[in-house]
Image (tube, rainbow, N blue to C red):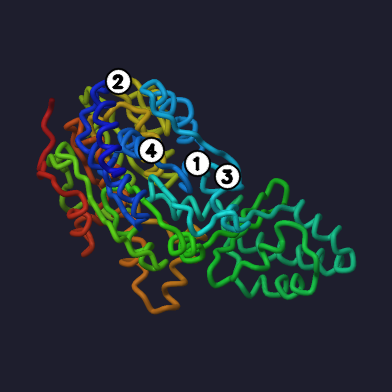
Amino acid sequence: MLEAHAHQQLKQLLLQERSAWPHHLTLSRLIARGLRRRDHALIQLSPCSQDQWWLGLLVPLCLQSRHCVLVLEDQQRQRLLQVERPRLQAEGLQLPCWQGLEAPQGDQLWLLNTQELVEAQRLGHLRAHHLLIIPEADQLSQRLRRAMALTLTASDWESLRRAQPSADGALLELYERLSRQLFGQATHSDASVRLQSCQLQSLRDLLSLLQPLPAPWARVLAADPQHWASWAQLDHRLLQWSWHLQALEPLNQLHALLKDHPILLLSSNGNSGPLQAELRSAGFQAEVDVHLREPSLLEPVPLFAPRRQPLPNTEVYAQHLLEQSRRLILGRAGMTIVLLNDPQMRQRLTSELAGEFGSRVLEQATAPEANGVICCSWEWWLTHQSQLPAPDQLIVALLPIASLESPLTAARVEALKQQGRDWFRELLLPEALSLMAPAIAPLRRSGGRLAVLDGRLRGRSWGEQVFQALQPWTPLHRLLPD
């Protein structure tokens, strides 16, 4: 059996490796089983496991890779080809790899990134017999959304006018009218302004009469306004704007990827609730759903969350955030991470803390001092935490509730409102909670402390769900000097 052969090969390989991760063999058996049975499987790993799952995934693929598609982002692919594959070859394991939009004819492992996956699906190169293997599946929806995104600039409008000279006047008049409306709606310089479907209906009517359309206008016409967010990014310096379109729920639009192919999903988020909800909505039913936990991530983290903290929309919040951050940073010998998505508030806090603590305070930089302070967004921290030492403390300045000022978020919320659904508890809150476990996982390993300075944690009824997402934790009622 493939499971037994993969188990033995990996067991011999692990004799040469020094790894404390306890799930190498279990993951290998699960992957081998999925390859043999062609399952629909969701394997949930603990947060920060991204450097650990390579061997358990690749060893079975060395034994059986025919009709297998491994979806890796470019950085991951580089690691596979330059680090992991040579390591396997040194132990006598061969993993032939194929790159390109067309499927390999032999037994090679087909490597695609998310953009290539979407394109191969569109061109019909993905067949029903292809088994998809997708690590970091918790980021699949965001990556698909970026891969499907459309951006049109002034040069695209010029291309359309050249391709359809008979409609040149109408297109120019329409573009200028939209420009006047958008710049008139802007509340600040270089703003993002959401485009309403009524504003674009005239353009869609005109495009439907013009054939053929140059790229990417045919895709724009095919994008259903009910399922796509549309906004303009203004450039006041040049008095131009770029038109952005992104799918609201890309998994729903690409449901054939999930339903027509056997698929193995690896998630290392720690909270798979939003992912499972998206998968169910897209028609994916996991025949195998396994969670591989790590004992080191079950240690309680000290949590400092004072009562009676001001809410973020009050005038005193910025001063409260500065004073509490100063108290928390003072005297700490290790690295501090301050999580804050609001760019203006983050820049201001960084400047004020730098005035107090000097050059050890940085904004979104990966070369801190030993006792450095990094102010960053949640997304930046989740992306770069593997490049940084484990923090001594994590300060949550603002919970990661998505802002309705984002055109994409506003469009997704509007779609739920039209269905009469609870957009906050079904969308914004679950997505925020899904970021908690991976954000604090390095803190659990380092034994550091967590501070939440957002008054909504105790001032809102949903704060209890945040406390649950942070479990296990122990209360830290007062700050004591080291």
Question: Where residue 367 sits in the image (x, y, percent)?
Answer: 40, 23
- Amino acid under disc 1: Asp
* 317 and 4: which is toward the camera: 4
Name the residue rendered at 66%, 49% in the picture: 235
SS assignment at label 3: loop
Mark 3 sits on what residue? 105
> Do residues under tags 4 and 1 come within 8 Å of each other at their CB atoms?
no
- Crowding around mark 3 (Cα neighbors within 10 Å: few <14, some 14 to 19, many 20+) is few
- Amino acid under disc 4: Leu
Relative to 210, say whether 389 is above or below: above
Mark 1 sits on what residue? 107
SS assignment at label 4: helix
Name the residue rendered at 28%, 49% in the picture: 44
- CA gap, disc 3 and disc 4: 17 Å
In the image, is 140 to the left or to the right of 198? left
- Crowding around mark 2 (Cα neighbors within 10 Å: few <14, some 14 to 19, many 20+) is some
> Do residues under tags 3 and 1 come within 8 Å of each other at their CB atoms?
no
- CA gap, disc 4 and disc 2: 44 Å
Question: Where residue 354 sits in the image (x, y, percent)?
Answer: 37, 28
- Amino acid under disc 3: Gln
Residue occupying the far right of the picture: 166
If you read the primary sequence from the N terminus, does the residue marked by circle 2 or circle 3 appear first?
3
Question: Where residue 329 sits in the image (x, y, percent)?
Answer: 25, 30
- Amino acid under disc 2: Ala
Q: What label sits on residue 63 in the rendered view? A: 4
The image quarter in which residue 311 lies: bottom left
Q: What label sits on residue 370 in the rendered view? A: 2
Question: Where residue 287 sits in the image (x, y, percent)?
Answer: 29, 61
* 73 and 197: which is toward the camera: 73
